[in-house]
Image (cartoon, rainbow, N blue to C red):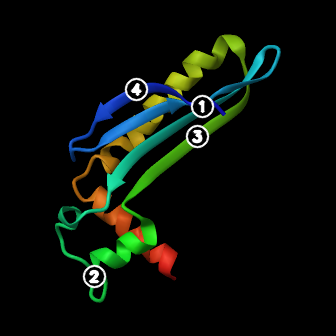
Amino acid sequence: MEETSYKTIELENGYQLNLLDVSRKISADAYLVKMKAVIEIGIEDDLFTQGLPDGVTLSAIQETLGEKIDYVYTVERNFIMDHEKDALFESLVQTFLKNLGPYVAKPVFPERFVLKAYEEKTK
């Protein structure tokens, strides 16, 4: 599936939110409209401003998750008519920015996301 960059937003926490259009045509006049939001988070010592949980080290996190991790959120709608595609895509973007934008822009978001991903992988 081809990804087209739609918009890049600098977040308050210093990270970049990349919004991608991953829509594709599924019939002569209909689309699968898909929006993908991605934030690349480098796993480095200065990420953990609140300290690491007891017994967890930076090297253990990096061995489990790698040097970076992507936060990825996707939303899609199927069988959207050709003439409605662009307006619907913009609506998906605006809904994401309104509902999740403030959350992913918080300074603690990257740290919490990495720790949650590490916890899920090690359970």
The foreground one among 10 and 45 is 45
Residue under the image location 56 percent in, 43 percent down: 74
Q: Residue furthest bottom?
A: 55
Q: Residue furthest top?
A: 83
- Please determine whether, in this image, residue 79 is positioned above or below residue 85: below
Residue under numbered circle 4: 7
Residue under numbered circle 2: 53
Q: CA distance from mark 2 to mark 3?
A: 33 Å
Q: Position of residue 13 (x, y in %)?
A: 21, 47
Mark 1 in CB contact with mark 3 (< 8 angstroms): no
Task: Name the amino acid, label 3.
Answer: Val
Q: Looking at the image, tell me whether mark 4 or mark 2 is earlier in sequence order.
A: 4
Numbered circles on residues, count:
4
Q: Looking at the image, tell me whether mark 1 or mark 4 is earlier in sequence order.
A: 4
Q: Secondary structure at mark 2?
A: loop
The foreground one among 50 and 78 is 50
Mark 2 in CB contact with mark 3 (< 8 angstroms): no
Mark 3 in CB contact with mark 4 (< 8 angstroms): no
- Give the number of the disc on residue 22: 1
Q: Quadrant of the N terminus?
A: top right
Task: Name the amino acid, label 4.
Answer: Lys
